[in-house]
Amino acid sequence: MKPLDPRLLRRARAARLFLLASIVLGVASGALVIVQAVLLAHGIAGVVLRGSGVTAVAWGLAAVVAGRALLVWAQEVVAQRAAAAVKSTLRRQVLEHALKLGPVRLSGERSSALTTLLTKGLDDLDPYFARYLPQLVLASTVPAGVIGWMATGDLLAAGTVLVTLPLIPIFMTLIGWAARAHSRHRQHALAILAHHFADVTGGMTTLKLFGRAKAQTAAVQQVTDRYRIASLGTLRLAFLSSLVLDLLASLSVALVAIGVGLRLVDGKLGLETALVVLILAPEAYLPLRQLGMQFHASADGVAASEEALRVLETAVPNWGDRRDVPDLRCTALSLYDVTVTYPGRDAPALNGFDLELRPGEIVALTGPSGSGKSTVLAAILGLVAIESGGVVAGGSGAAEFEPRVWRRQFAWVPQHPSLRDGSVAANVRLGRPDASDDEVLTSLDAAGARELSPAQRVGERGALLSGGQRRRVALARALITDAAVLLLDEPTAGLDCETEAEVIAGLRGAGRTVLLVAHRPAWIAAADRVVELGRSANEYRELSVS
Ligand SMILES: Nc1ncnc2c1ncn2[C@@H]1O[C@H](COP(=O)(O)OP(=O)(O)OP(=O)(O)O)[C@@H](O)[C@H]1O
C-alpha cells in the first residue's frame, strides 16, 4: 500500500492543496518542537546552574504551546475540509464514470459493492486525511529537523537516533504488508455482507414462498461472522503493531539516554546540551510511532480509494464527438460482422453478425435463450464493446458520434425495464418531459395499457404493478419519444392476444422502424423480416421476407 497514491493527487485537487498546507504546517510544527526543547533545557539549566528566574522562559514556553495548539487546530480544519472535498470529488467522478460505462459494462461490478464503496467505503477516507496524511508529513519533517539540531550539540546522540530511527519504518512496512491483506479481506467481507443482505431482502417474497426465509438467518449469520472475524483481525494487528513500535521507540530513546548520561557524568557534555538532546530524542521517534498507529485507522480508507480508482480506470469506450447523426427515419442502419465477447467469457455472445434495418420496417429477432438477441440491441446502443465489425449509418460508424446524440435516435425497452417511484404519467414522461396529458394517454393506449390511470403510483422499481404492466408502461415511455428506431426486448410478454394485436397495429400505424426480440407468433407474423439467431454464436438465418 503506497502511503500516498499519486493517482489520488492527480484526481483530487483538494488533496494536492491539502498536502501543500500540511507541509507548511508540519515544518512550522517541527520548528516549534525544537524551540520548546531549547527553551525548556535553557530554563532548567538556568535554575540548576545559575539560579536564574523562570518567568521569561515560562512566557516563551506558553507562547510555543499556544502556537503548537493553533497549528493542531489549523491542521484539523484543513484536514476535515480536504477529506470532505476529496470524498465528494471521488464520489462524483465514480458516479459519472459508472454512467459512462453503462449498465452492461457495469454488470461485472456488483451494484451493492459499488453502493458500499460510494457511501461507507469512501467515508473511511476521513481518518486518512485527518490523521494519517498530516502524521506522514510530520514524520518526514520533524525527525530530520530534530536530528539536525541534535547534531549541532551532540554528534553521537544524533548518530544513535539516525541509526535506530529507520527500524521503525522497516517494521511499519512489514506490518503494512500484512495490514493491506487484512484490509482488502475486510472490504471484501463487507461487500459480500452488503450484497448478500440486499439479495435476501430483495428476494424475500420468493424465499418465503419456498419456505426458505428462516434458513437465510444462518446464511446472514455466516457472512456477518466472516465480517466480524475480519474486523477483529485488523484490530488485533493494529494493537500488536503499536506494541512493537512503542517497544522499539522506547528502547532507542533509552539507548540515547544511557549514552548522554554517561558522557554527562564524565563531563564530556554540558547540562544544557544534554537536556536538549534528552528532551528532543523522544520527539524524533514520536511522529513515526504515531504514523504507525494512524496507518491502521486509515488502511480501510486507502483500500476504498484504491477501489474507487480501479473503477475510474476501467476503460470507457472510445466515442467520437460528431453530432451530425444521420436521420434514421430515412437512412438504413447496418450491423456488419459484429462480434461481441463479454468480459470474463471465453466464447463470443455474437460472432460475425450482419443485419440491415431499413427505415420503417419491423424486424423480429428470434432464437433460443442465450443466443445473443439482447446483445444485438446492446451493440446498436453502444452498451457493449464491439470487438470487430461495427454499427454503421449513412456511411459512418456509430462510434464516431457523441453517444448521447447517437442514442437519441433510439427508444429502448429492455427485458426488465426500470421504473421510478412516482405516477404512471411521470414514468411515461421520462421519454418526453414536455408531453401533454393527452399524449401520455395516447401512448398508454398504444402500448395496450389503457387500464392504467396516469395518476396511479408505480412504487419503487414498479413494485405496485404487475410484470406485464411494468413492461407496457416502459413501452408507452418508448412510444412517446421522437426516436426514429424502437428497440424492443420482448415488449408484449404477459399481454393477452387481443391487446397484443392492438399494440402491433399501433406500431405499424406509427410507421417507425422497429427491431424487436420476439418469440410470440403474432409478432413473427407481423414482422417484415424475421432473423433467427442459432444456438452457436455465428449461426444466423433470415427466416422470411414479406
Ligand atoms: N453482462 C453479461 N456478462 C457476461 N455475459 C453475458 C452478459 N449478458 C449476456 N451474457 C451472455 O451472452 C450470451 C447472450 O446473451 P443475451 O442476453 O444476448 O441472449 P438472449 O438471446 O437475449 O437470451 P434470452 O432470450 O434468454 O433473453 C449468453 O450466453 C449470456 O450468458
Image: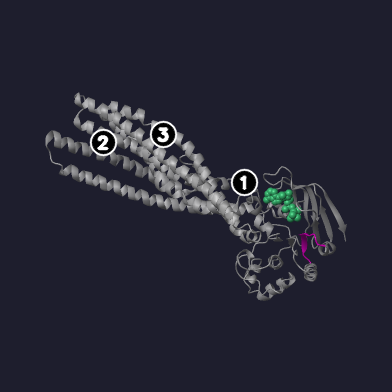
- Give coordinates of residue 374: x percent, y percent: 73, 55
* Quadrant where the C terminus is found in the figure: bottom right
User: What is the CA distance from the residue labelled 3 to the residue labelled 1?
Assistant: 36 Å
Q: Position of residue 533 (x, y in %)?
A: 80, 52
Is there any visible trace of residue 373 in the rendered image? Answer: no
Instruction: Determine which residue is flagged by label 3.
Output: 169
Which circle marks residue 315 in the picture? 1
For residue 438, above or below residue 15: below
**Mark found first going from the N terminus, 3 or 1:** 3
Left or right placement of residue 439 versus residue 81 in this view: right
Instruction: State the image quarter where residue 167 is shown.
Output: top left
Disc 3 residue crowd, few under 14, some 14–19, many 20+, Cα 10 Å: some
Q: Which residues are magenta?
A: 511-520
| Amino acid at the residue labelled 3 | Pro
Residue 364 drawn above or below residue 121: below
Task: Give the quadrant of residue 34.
Answer: top left
Q: Residue at x 21, y 39 (%)?
A: 40
Residue at left offset 26%, top offset 26% = 259
For the residue labelled by badge 2, is the local secondary structure a helix, a strand or a loop? helix
Q: Is residue 514 visible?
A: yes
Toward the viewer: 319 or 192?
192
